[in-house]
């Protein structure tokens, strides 16, 4: 499951989405997330799923990468469906288990919530997979720059968020190495009860935390050695610039938004 986490990874390719300005991609993701929560019908989710699939194909990325991104959140998705199925009341009674009942309204609400979560995970992965960490940092900093007038450290916040995302695949690789080393010494992470599995994870978690702190210290030392002083006086080799492609993408998302609102999907 650890290898299935795709958040924070960048997949270089030549596609329409890769060429978009990172600021525009962040804004489009924001509007797309809002749009997902406006969906109230099954046909609406089919429509949004189709649009998401078109974007995936347009990114020229393997579909299996997005399916892998869903595996780590399957527990959350299943738990959400379970809670709504048993505790949201309304409609026809489908199943009775002692004092608990499963009703049609609960199942429908649970399905809608799980579909929202799945599309949210996929679209977020689409942003990180098609945007390099440096471009993502510049985009976040630019969008937060108006808050500098009220004392918000936009550059530092953007840098912290991007470093956090970038550390995800690094820690995944590190945990995989540690797990293989522990398995070579006889550790078994897949057998036993839940308590036993939790105990078996201790030899994995402790060295992983030590490695994370060591990498953070090395990164801080490297930034200080290069006289890094935050965003003050910082220049860029490449300046972000909007192109017609960005406005075409914005127009497309706006049209989808208007279509959903107008048709009541």
Image (tube, rainbow, N blue to C red):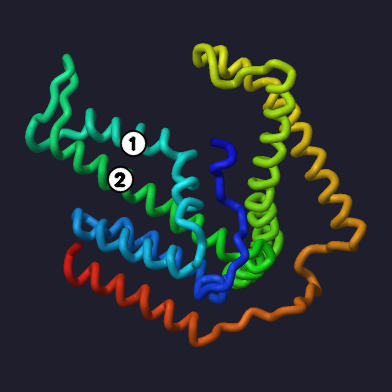
Which sits in the foreground, 13 or 23? 13
Snapshot quadrant of residue 162: bottom right
* Residue 46, position as x, y percentages in the image: 25, 58
Q: Residue at x 17, y 14 (%)?
A: 98
Quadrant of the frame with the N terminus: top right
Q: Residues within 10 Å of mark 1 (few under 14, many from 20)?
A: some
Dot 2: element: helix
Q: Tell me if I can see residue 140 in this picture.
A: no
Q: Residue at x 37, y 62 (%)?
A: 53
* Residue 47, position as x, y percentages in the image: 26, 63
* Residue 72, position as x, y percentages in the image: 49, 39
Quadrant of the frame with the C terminus: bottom left
User: On residue 139, which mark appears?
Assistant: none
Which sits in the foreground, 19 or 211? 19
**Disc 1 marks which residue?**
80
In the rendered view, tell whether residue 3 sits above or below residue 101.
below
CB atoms at circles 2 and 1 under 8 Å apart? yes
Is residue 203 shown left or right of residue 108?
right
Residue found at the far bottom of this picture: 244
Q: Residue at x 67, y 52 (%)?
A: 166
Is residue 216 shown left or right of residue 246?
right
Q: CA distance from mark 2 to mark 1?
A: 7 Å
Q: Tell me if I can see residue 192 in this picture.
A: yes
**Disc 2 marks which residue?**
113
Dot 1: element: helix
């Amino acid at each position: 499951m650890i290898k299935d986490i795709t958040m924070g990874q960048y997949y270089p390719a030549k596609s329409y989405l890769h060429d978009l300005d990172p600021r525009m991609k962040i804004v489009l993701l924001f509007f797309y997330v809002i749009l997902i929560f406006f969906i109230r019908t099954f046909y609406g989710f089919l429509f949004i799923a189709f649009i998401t699939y078109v974007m995936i194909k347009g990114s020229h990325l393997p579909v299996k990468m997005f399916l892998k991104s869903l595996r780590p959140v399957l527990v959350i998705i299943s738990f959400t469906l379970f809670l709504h199925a048993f505790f949201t009341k309304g409609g026809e009674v489908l199943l009775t288990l002692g004092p608990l009942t499963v009703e049609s309204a609960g199942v429908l609400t649970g399905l809608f919530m799980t579909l929202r979560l799945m599309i949210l995970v996929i679209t977020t992965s689409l942003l990180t997979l098609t945007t390099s960490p440096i471009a993502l940092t510049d985009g976040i900093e630019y969008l937060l720059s108006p808050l500098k007038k009220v004392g918000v450290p936009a550059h530092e916040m953007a840098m912290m968020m991007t470093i956090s995302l970038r550390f995800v695949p690094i820690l995944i690789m590190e945990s995989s190495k540690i797990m293989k080393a522990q398995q070579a010494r006889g550790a078994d992470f897949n057998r036993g009860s839940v308590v036993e599995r939790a105990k078996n994870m201790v030899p994995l978690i402790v060295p992983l935390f030590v490695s994370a702190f060591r990498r953070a210290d090395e990164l801080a030392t490297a930034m200080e050695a290069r006289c890094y002083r935050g965003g003050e006086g910082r220049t860029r080799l490449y300046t972000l610039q909007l192109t017609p492609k960005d406005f075409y993408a914005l127009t497309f998302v706006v049209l989808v938004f208007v279509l959903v609102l107008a048709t009541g999907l």
